[in-house]
Image (cartoon, grey):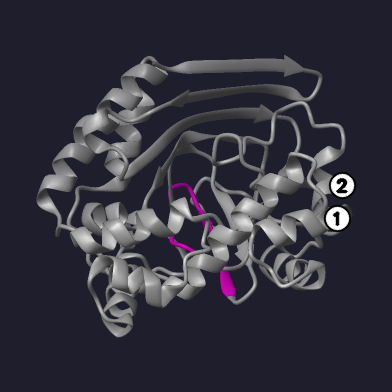
Amino acid sequence: MTRVRSGWGPGGSWEIALARPHPRLRPGVVSYRGIRLALDHPRRRLETPIGAVTLLLGFEGPVRISGAGRPTTSLVSVYSGLSTTAVVGEHSGRVSGVEVLLTPWAAFTLFGTPQHELTDRTVDPDELPHKLCGSAGELAGALAALPSWADRFGLLDEVFARWSAAGPPSAVRVRRAWSLLVRSAGAMPVPRLAEEVGWSVRQLENRFREQIGLGPKAAARVLRLQRARRLLAAGRGLAETAALCGFYDQAHLSGEFKAMTGFTPRQFTAARGRPGPEAPVGDRLNGEATSLVLPVPTGGRGADFSKTGQVR
């Protein structure tokens, strides 16, 4: 079932379409989200670390992506591996495409690429070093040509089923360990996680590096912070959130929050509470606080968003 929301106003128009992938693809393929923005001004958005790989199959307009420790890139279609720091995306105001969230072990199979090669990176999916699938650019073009979001999501179901059958299978024990870590919101100690799946800690770390991208300890940091953002957005206090998420105290939570998002918890919560723009933020995870719309700097030449996807 596809749900579509849209709106328009003095600043432009927007459309968001949401759907779940076919059951045979779940839980590896988490969600589909169609996006169409036609705004009369640029837009900047902060994306915080989440426990999923993001694939954007763009139809028009590049997104300029920057972040701590990574080069600034401008891409129409984007693959983002797991990360422990936030990134900022900026576009001209006109952008459309389909965003797909994947568990990292499913991304390992679909793209045939060791995930540690893509950690803390944003790349053109057609330039993945060990890509086994067909062209992401061709897929994006085929999606853009279809008449409805439901048709586009149906095509993705078909394509991902073929890519999954052709790619290297992920280890059953990796999938189980990832599921246990997600269910515990990063709280399960790594030695216990290894014991649960019948591996040594070293074996678990090596397999996580290959098929998840982050080691189990770093992945747990991302999942703990993800839960903390959710609790704070629901109105929980700092002390309660720190205790529930396994942080030593409020200072520990605040330090991790700042290191991984660039904001303190209070700053992030306050920014989320400000009146929204004419188009919704569109958090990547349903019911999660993952994104912030940021002010666009005034003055200066700024970025030139050309159709070639290059920042000039």
Residue 87 location, quadrant: bottom right
Say which residue label 2 marks.
270
Which of 6/288 is in front? 288
* Residue at disc 1, secondary structure: helix
Q: What residue is rendered at 73% in x and 61% in y? A: 242
* Disc assigned to residue 207: none
204 vs 60, left or right, is: left
Whether residue 44 is visible: no
Residue 133 image offset from top left, x and y in percent: 19, 51
62 vs 80, left or right, is: right
* Residue at disc 2, secondary structure: helix
Say which residue label 1 marks.
267
Marks 2 and 1, how far apart at CA: 5 Å
Verify CB contact (< 8 Å) between mark 2 and mark 1: yes
Residue 167 location, quadrant: bottom left
Which segment did they paint magenta? 70-82
Which of 298/67 is in front? 67
Quadrant showing the N terminus:
top left
- Crowding at dot 2, Cα within 10 Å, few <14 / some 14-19 / many 20+, comes out as few
